[in-house]
Image (cartoon, helix red, strand yellow):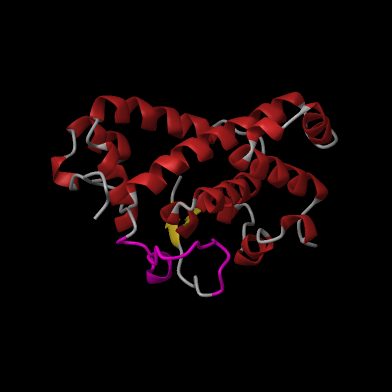
Amino acid sequence: MPRIASLPVDQWDPGLRALLQVDTAPLPDVHKTILGVYANAPELAKPFFTFEAAFWAGFTLRRRLLEMMRLRIAFHNQCRSCMAMRCEPALEDGLTEDLVCSLERPVEAPDLTEAEKAALQFADAFATNHLAIDDETIEGLRRFYSEKEIVELCMVCAYCTGFGRFAAIYKAIEDLPESYQDMTARTTPWASDHTERVVVPF
């Protein structure tokens, strides 16, 4: 069970149920468990999920890049549910498990662009030592990204670092593939024994 109670769908606020379309769109069990944690605070959950839908729709950066950044940050957060999930828009934008495997050593990966490597290095720093990000770091991003895109990079890192840590804390792992449920050691989204993935629509 999660450390924070996950309300079953039939106990959710009706407005939250309607917003998330849970009665018309089937969701993976782990996604329902995660949403059930938020359902404890419906007056916060409703504006949050309204924001989240607009947030992910607003990026001009490719979803495959955002997803790779999300997965690198999930590794640093050790959020099992975040690592097990794959976002459908990123899969439609060319994310493959081969690309996910490249995230183990992104700087050395031959199938990542220099721009993607720079963004992933930035995500690593943001998630592990944000005070090490300096003028030189931002100038390095400017080789590949506009000011608007750099703001997008910062925003996806902020979102994934903060809410990924929240998800790691409430530990919704019982509906994940078995290989993600072992809490005795660190895990990764690119481990060879992680043959199952949870696809979510956002």
In the image, 80: left or right of 137? left
Q: Position of residue 46 (x, y in %)?
A: 31, 28
* Quarter where residue 184 is shown: bottom left
Q: How many marks?
A: 0
x, y percent for residue 123: 65, 42
Image quadrant where one finds the N terminus: bottom left
Magenta stretch: includes residue 154: no
Q: From the top left corner, tell me how far across and down residue 102 is, in percent.
A: 69, 62
42 horizontally vs 85: left or right: left
Give me the residue at 58% from left, 54% from top: 92
Please name whichever residue, 68 or 158, is drawn nearer the observer in this view of the structure.
158
In terms of depth relative to the viewer, which is nearer, 132 or 160?
Answer: 132
Residue at position x 36%, y 62% in the image: 176
Q: Quadrant of residue 36?
A: top left
Whether residue 186 appears in magenta in the rendering, the answer is yes
**Left or right relative to 177: residue 129:** right
Is residue 29 in view?
Answer: yes
Q: Is residue 73 above or below residue 61?
A: below
Magenta segment main secondary structure: loop
**Which residue: 27% across, 42% down?**
37
Magenta region: 174-192
Q: Which residue is outermost to the right?
A: 143
The residue closer to the viewer here, 39 or 174, is: 174
Can you say whether 10 is above or below 112 in the image?
above
What percent of the width, then of the height, locates residue 127?
Answer: 59, 41
Place residue 177 in its image quadrant: bottom left
Q: Is residue 9 above or below residue 100?
A: above
| Residue 25 appears in the picture as rendered | no
